[in-house]
Image (spheres, rainbow, N blue to C red):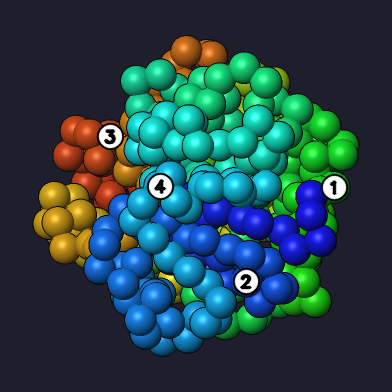
Amino acid sequence: MSATLRVSVVGAGAWGTALAKVLAEKGTDVRLWSYEDHVADAINERSENPYLEGVTLPATLHATSDLASALDGAELVVSVSPSQVVRSVMGAAKPHVGPDALVVSASKGIELGTHRRMDEVIREALGEGIEERFAVLSGPSFASEVASGQPTAVVAASHVEETRQRVQEAFQTPWFRVYTNPDVVGVELGGALKNVVALASGMTAGLGYAHNTTAALITRGLAEMARLGVAMGAHQATFYGLAGMGDLVLTCTGGLSRNRTVGFRLGRGESLEAILGDMTAVAEGVETTRAVHELALEHGVEMPIVEQVYAIVEHGRTPAEALQALMLRDPKPEEWS
């Protein structure tokens, strides 16, 4: 990489913009690609993004809705599109991604239909040769808090030690701390699966329950996440770290969590269609629930919380009925395997 790193951030939602801000404030040459012209215009003309209200962006951060222009000469490409469009966006990006460019996925989710993780989707979209220069960035990190400079810790995962160290160096700042991890599968799954548990946590809050219930959901949700992760080749210990427990606690308890908010409104009795209809940002957990339910069946893994959330979003079971079903399951020992 050159002394002044040239970066393309693909996706100008709140999270992509926050990461672009982190990089730009380090003196990195950052171009931010936006699907929407008006978002790119707001960033260039007013140093603001409507998806990240109240944050003034560096004047050096340039946005564009031209994907080829955004990717021209990029040494580091950061994919931050919603998970269900990553394949199409990165497929369109393929002709413009340099053969030596480092590629980082910062999207969280599982692709519907294929059950692919984002690392698998990007490898398929960009083709052979990407494995050695690919990494995942995940962890407990609300975009608005990262953008305002609040101390945050995340994890960069890659199968290649040099690659994860390069990503660590690219993103590390005095207030944005990056750890490394070789377990790509575990880090990917932690970032995706926690959104399903966050829906459940929001539902219990919407029903009027408090800390006891949340603590139980987080703990048993983590057990489910780890079980599926190990069945899919992840390391169990990864789920006790930033991409697992850290992100799970944040998303299940934080008021800025979109998935918790969707769950809360479901718990209050609103319909899923009405909730999603008036949201401007994407709550990945709804689609992820469907994919995770299918993965649990495919791998023969028991995931009672996922099963109940799936019954709510797919079959109209009420949150109160789902909670009662969980509490009335046969008594058993606490197990983590």
User: Residue 252, percent across and down?
Assistant: 50, 60
User: Residue 215, percent across and down?
Assistant: 58, 59
Residue name at image x 44 percent, y 71 percent: 256
Q: Contact (CB < 8 A) between labels 4 and 2?
A: no
Alpha carbon distance from label 2 to label 3: 43 Å
Nearer the observer: mark 2 or 3; the answer is 2
223 w.r.t. 204: above or below: above
Mark 4 or mark 3, earlier in chain: 4
Q: Contact (CB < 8 A) between labels 2 and 3?
A: no
Question: Counting other residues with Cα less than 10 Å from the Cα at mark 4, is it few (<14), some (14-19), or many (20 or more)?
Answer: many
Alpha carbon distance from label 1 to label 3: 42 Å
Residue at image mark 2: 24
Query: Mark 4 falls on what kind of element?
Result: helix
The three-letter amino acid code for the residue at tag 1 is Gln
Alpha carbon distance from label 4 to label 2: 19 Å
Residue 67's tag is 4
Query: Mark 1 falls on what kind of element?
Result: helix
Q: In the figure, is residue 227 to the left or right of 93? A: right
Residue at image mark 3: 311
- Residue 60 sits in which quadrant? bottom right
Q: Contact (CB < 8 A) between labels 4 and 3?
A: no
Most foreground residue, 284 or 99? 99
